[in-house]
Amino acid sequence: MASSPDLAALLTRAESVLARLEAWLPPPPPATDWSAHAWRWRVGAGGRGGLEAVHKPHGLALDALTGVDEQKARLVRNTRQFIAGRPANNVLLTGARGTGKSSLVKALLPAFAADGLRLIEVDKTHLADLADIVELLAERPERFIIYCDDLSFEEGDDAYKALKTALDGGLARRADNVLIYATSNRRHLMPERMQDNLDSRNVNGEIHPGEAVEEKVSLSERFGLWLSFYPFDQDTYLAAVAVWLAHHQLKLTPRAERAALLWALTRGARSGRVAWQFACDWAGRTPAERKAD
């Protein structure tokens, strides 16, 4: 049996080794600030993730978003069902860029935060952590929307498998207080190749899609509610310009209307985003500069 001095020396060496090992271990994630209304999922050193509070989230008023009235009404109805504890669907918002998909999701937070709605932004690169995020939220009293912006996947990208599991619940049941709202420019979230169509089969006169097509469609089909967004026509675009000019205490005068149409022409698109960008430019000019345009 080791003598007392030998035992003390052994314990000292063991403590030294443990101290060196602890220096290599990543620090534990900070405690979640549940007083916030919005968070980002952040992954630090060592791959440990945690919820980082966003105390001043960017959110617009729902009334400020024009040209998407039907999509807005359906999304708000689904969200009202969710915060009321009634059945509701995961939502996929797809379509033309700049038409308000992301803004519409973010506008839900100021509209329903008082009713217990909370928003968590998760980047595509962290979709593999969805199961951990849902487990973290499952016992909370709030109602959480996990928000994935500009979502799309490339060939060989396995992150979509984690999303499929989160949407369907996998072996564990889906948390009743969590929904996923995702935006994308791709309806099926994954690239659609010509080769995929060539793999289709003709069976007794019926077209049967190939396995690649079936796999791609199976992901988007897991979202119970699809909302499609389309490029603005001229009247809708000008209506959006008028709203954003009013935000800056300006009116859509004939001079501003001509400038707005020229702005859209140079951008090659008419959308809510282009309308907002024009309004910022127009409001930033001096009165003399606006008259000279």
Image: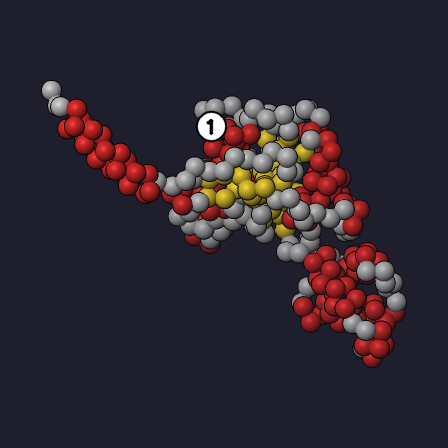
Name the spot of residue 220 as percent of width and height, x first.
Answer: 55, 40
Nearer to us in this view, 5 or 190: 5
Provide the residue designation for mark 1.
170
Res. 56 visible in picture: yes
Name the spot of residue 123 as percent of width and height, x first.
Answer: 52, 46
Identified at 33% across, 42% down, the residue is: 23
Looking at the image, residue 57 sits to the left or right of residue 127; the answer is right
Quadrant housing residue 47: top left
Quadrant housing residue 248: bottom right
Q: How is the image coloured?
A: secondary structure
* Total residue callouts: 1
Residue sitting farthest toward the front: 5
Looking at the image, residue 237 sits to the left or right of residue 32; the answer is right
Res. 225 visible in picture: no
Nearer to us in this view, 27 or 267: 27
Name the spot of residue 25 as percent of width and height, x first.
Answer: 34, 40
Looking at the image, residue 289 sits to the left or right of residue 124; the answer is right
282 lies above or below 180? below
Residue sitting farthest toward the left: 1
Tell me if mark 1 has few (under 14), some (14-19) or many (20+) residues whose alpha carbon lies within 10 angstroms of its own: few
286 lies above or below 128? below
293 lies above or below 98? below
Quadrant (top left/top right/bottom left/bottom right) for the N terminus: top left
Give the residue type at disc 1: Gly
Quadrant (top left/top right/bottom left/bottom right) for the C terminus: bottom right
Name the spot of residue 38 as percent of width and height, x first.
Answer: 62, 40
